[in-house]
Image: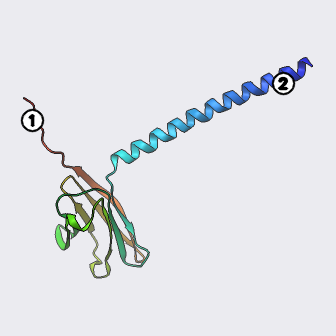
Amino acid sequence: MRTDTKKNNNMKTKTIILGIFVAIISTFTFNNSNAQRLDEPAIKVVPASEKDAVKVIYGYHANDVVEVKFLSNNTTLKVDKIKAKDFEDGFMRTYSLKNLDQDDLRIEVSGSEVSATYQLKNINGRWIAQLEKSSYNYPIVALK
């Protein structure tokens, strides 16, 4: 009878230790995932389902025009100005890159509060975007 009680207590202790270990690992995982999201803007450039196209996702509310510029070697190839009245809390647009097959192709998405620039690489007609830089434009507040 004592060995059964001892086995049950030992099993309870192991279960409690395992539960604490899982809770600690979950906390670290959750904290790391939040840190990565805070550093990156809510502007994404992802490959589209069709060949030679990308989707631009802008996840902010805007009061002014948002510009999507296609750049190559510091030259502007194409500009799309999206009026704030055309979207409420962000937008997603697909852009064809068929005629823009350049070596140094970048997309710059600029709103009144945030901008991001992505470097694009063409791999067999599939465009892969990598975040090059982002900046936040916070309003200036004066203290008395």
Quadrant containing the C terminus is top left
Residue 67 is at least partly visible in this image: no
- Residue 131 image position (x, y, % from top left): 32, 57
Expressed as whole percent of the image width and height from the top left, the position of residue 15 reads: 72, 30
Q: Residue 88 carries which label?
A: none
The furthest residue to the top: 2
**82 horizontally vs 119: left or right:** left
Label 1 crowding class (10 Å Cα cut-off): few <14, some 14-19, many 20+? few
- Rendered residue at 18%/58% (across/down): 63
Amino acid tagged 1: Ala
Q: Is mark 2 on a helix, strand or loop?
A: helix
Kindly identify which residue carries mark 1. Answer: 142
Amino acid marked by disc 2: Lys
Q: Earlier in the sequence, mark 2 or mark 1?
A: 2
Between the C-alphas of marks 2 and 1, the distance is: 67 Å
Please say which color scheme the image uses: rainbow
Q: In which quarter of the image is residue 47?
A: bottom left
Q: Could you say where residue 117 lies in the image, as x and y percent from the top left? A: 26, 60
Q: In this view, does 86 lie above or below 18?
A: below
Q: Residue at x 19, y 67 (%)?
A: 83
Q: In which quarter of the image is the N terminus?
A: top right
Residue 22 falls in image quadrant: top right
Residue drawn 62% across the image and 32% down it: 21
Q: In the displayed structure, does residue 97 sit left or right of residue 123? A: left
Above or below, comparing residue 47 to residue 117 in the picture: below
Q: Mark 2 points at which residue?
A: 7
